[in-house]
Image (cartoon, rainbow, N blue to C red):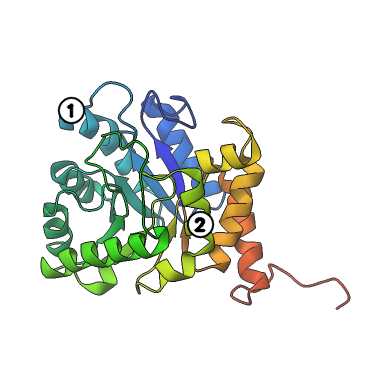
């Protein structure tokens, strides 16, 4: 899953894809570099920075969704916690609602239930949308995350979402410190055991920077290591910024695990 954020203050690209033409170019480049999926967002998760209205979020994401829809066989998700934005994005060609707020608004489940060809990503995060949650505490981080996801999946199923429409995300770094995120990563099999395809969003996050003492812009190697570990431990979708490198890591990991054939065979054949 490639990331295209049409925000002026994204933590990673610092607004490099905020202009519409740059966002569309980023979508095209991601597909060319091997992305199977493009995740499009117009509001960052962090509460830092100005509020973004629903109308402004729509103006940011809809033309990018429409541009992405020109690519056949590419999954398109919209990263939003707003029902109206998700509804318009689906009408424009999005296939997945990526809600990073733990289904804070259950009407998103109603929307997905009403659109049987769509999917819903349910993410572990415990704060209200765009709200700080300082010094989060967990009794048992992996067990607590798994229990939260089971509960929110239950909400979605209760509102008519079918099991095959659900994807889960343990929410690396979201309302978690670095020690929490490192532990949840090595215990990803416990999250996968919830029973739905699991997304791992590990790219360039603070747990990588704090672990390796690397600032933004110097976290590629750590992100790729986390990606490979996440795949081995059960992730089936990885949300990454550096698409070509991340696609190579994913495909090499898959080949070692026996899930993908080599592109060609010549050596010692």
* Most distant residue in the front direction: 139
* Coordinates of residue 129 in the picture (x, y in percent): 23, 39
Specify the quadrant that holds the C terminus. bottom right
Residue placed most toward the observer, 235 or 42: 235
Q: What is the number of callouts on the image?
A: 2
Residue 212 visible in image = yes
Up/down of 50 relative to 205, above or below:
above
Q: Nearer the viewer, residue 127 or 254?
A: 127
Query: Which residue corresponds to mark 2?
Result: 183
Looking at marks 1 and 2 on the same chain, the residue that comes earlier in the sequence is marked by 1
Where residue 49 appears, as percent x and y from the top left, is: 32, 22
Instruction: Where is residue 10? Give x, y as percent.
Output: 41, 29
Between marks 1 and 2 in the image, the one whose residue lies nearer the viewer: 2
Rendered residue at 32%/54% (across/down): 124
The residues bearing labels 1 and 2 have C-alpha atoms spaced at a distance of: 35 Å
Q: Does residue 117 appear anywhere in the picture?
A: no
- Kindly state the secondary structure of the residue where label 1 is placed: loop
Q: Which residue is mark 1?
A: 53
């Amino acid at each position: 899953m490639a990331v295209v954020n049409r925000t002026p203050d994204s933590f990673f690209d610092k607004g490099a894809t905020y202009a519409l033409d740059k966002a569309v170019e980023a979508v095209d480049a991601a597909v060319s570099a091997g992305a199977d999926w493009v995740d499009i967002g117009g509001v960052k998760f962090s509460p830092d920075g100005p509020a973004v209205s629903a109308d402004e979020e729509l103006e940011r994401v809809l033309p990018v969704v429409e541009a992405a829809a020109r690519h056949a066989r590419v999954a398109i998700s919209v990263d939003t916690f707003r029902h109206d934005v998700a509804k318009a994005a689906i009408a424009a060609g999005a296939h997945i609602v990526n809600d990073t707020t733990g289904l804070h608004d259950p009407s998103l489940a109603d929307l997905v239930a009403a659109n049987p060809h769509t999917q819903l990503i349910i993410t572990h995060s415990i704060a209200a949308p765009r709200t700080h949650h300082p010094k989060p505490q967990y009794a048992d981080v992996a067990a607590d995350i798994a229990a939260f996801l089971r509960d929110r999946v239950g909400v979605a199923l209760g509102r008519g979402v079918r099991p095959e429409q659900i994807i889960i995300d343990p929410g690396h770094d979201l309302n978690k410190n670095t020690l929490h995120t490192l532990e949840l990563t090595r215990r990803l099999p416990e999250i996968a055991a919830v029973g739905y395809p699991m997304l791992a969003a590990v790219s360039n996050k603070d747990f990588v920077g704090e672990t390796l003492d690397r600032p933004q812009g110097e976290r590629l190697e750590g992100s790729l290591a986390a990606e490979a570990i996440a795949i081995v431990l059960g992730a089936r979708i990885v949300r990454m910024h550096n698409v070509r490198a991340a696609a190579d890591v994913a495909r090499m990991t898959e080949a070692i695990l026996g899930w993908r054939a080599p592109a060609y065979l010549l050596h010692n054949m």
